[in-house]
Image (tube, helix red, strand yellow):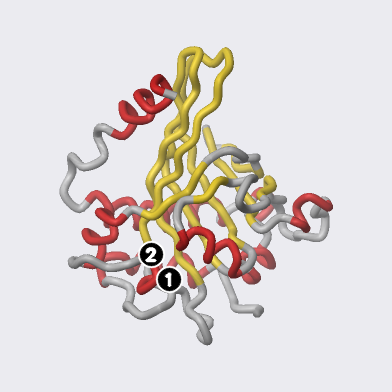
Amino acid sequence: MIFRSALIGLLAMGAPLLAGEAVDRANRAGEVLDEVMMTPESSIPQELINKAHCVAIVPGAKKAGFIIGARYGKGIISCRAPGNEAWTGPSAIRIEGGSFGLQIGGSSTDVVLLLLNKSGKDKLLSSRFTLGGDAAVAGGPVGRSAQAQTDAQMRAEILSYSRSRGVFAGVSLEGATLRQDADDNEELYGKPVTPNQILDGELAPPETVQPLMAALNRYSRHEH
């Protein structure tokens, strides 16, 4: 546990060095969505984004290790505003996780999560939660249609995807944890705010993250 915590800490050390990093990360998340959806044959099926209650994007999550492996990343989540098909402004999140085993080397991976129902959002707002433990997760299908979903994918509360070295595919992220990031939310909104205020649609999306909001609106239609 000590070694795992130390490794995650090393990966996180550079996070606060640049001013405006949370805003840059949010708009990079929009770029990731653009890049993923530009190739329909290997993109997230449109119908799944349309049905998603929330979308989380973690650009450049880190995985590194020597004997002990660890994941660490910071990104955003946006949900459907209650009673409104519009996407809420982004709320900052962290993804963390580790595993033991013979692992040497490192990589940087974009992660996309689709939360398919309100339960996933409620669990995230309550505290941090574990993918595959507190919420059923499965690697999501890619391509033009979601009709080829497996039973596991159809039962999952969350569908997970990753992109590394240009390859985008469904991936299992069981064991990773998600939690809210209060410091980054304060940077995004210019004042202390709560994740509930953001994801319940009580706050307008900041002008600084309009590229992200445009990307979310570009690739989704409301089907609830």
Residue under label 1, please give it: 199
Q: Secondary structure at mark 1?
A: helix
In three-dimensional space, the C-alpha distance between marks 2 and 1, rounded to whole angstroms, equals: 8 Å
Taking 154 as reference, is 135 left or right? left
User: Which quarter of the rendered picture does the N terminus lie within?
Assistant: top left
Of callouts 2 and 1, which one flags the residue occurring earlier in the amino acid sequence?
2
Q: Residue at x 52, y 50 (%)?
A: 129
Please state the horizontal and vertical placement of residue 101, each as a whole percent of the image.
Answer: 58, 16
Q: Residue at x 64, y 40 (%)?
A: 171
Please state the horizontal and vertical placement of residue 92, each as a whole percent of the image.
Answer: 36, 56
Please state the horizontal and vertical placement of residue 126, each as a whole percent of the image.
Answer: 47, 61
Near-viewer residue (186 or 123): 123
* Discs 2/1, front: 1
Near-viewer residue (157 or 169): 157
Q: Amino acid at mark 1?
A: Leu
User: Which quarter of the rendered picture does the C terminus lie within?
Assistant: bottom right
Q: Amino acid at mark 2?
A: Pro
Q: Residue at x 49, y 18 (%)?
A: 68
Please state the horizontal and vertical placement of residue 63, each as a whole percent of the image.
Answer: 46, 29
Corner quadrant of residue 145: bottom right
Near-viewer residue (88 or 179): 179
Which mark is on residue 90? Answer: 2
Q: Residues within 10 Å of mark 1 (few under 14, many from 20)?
A: many
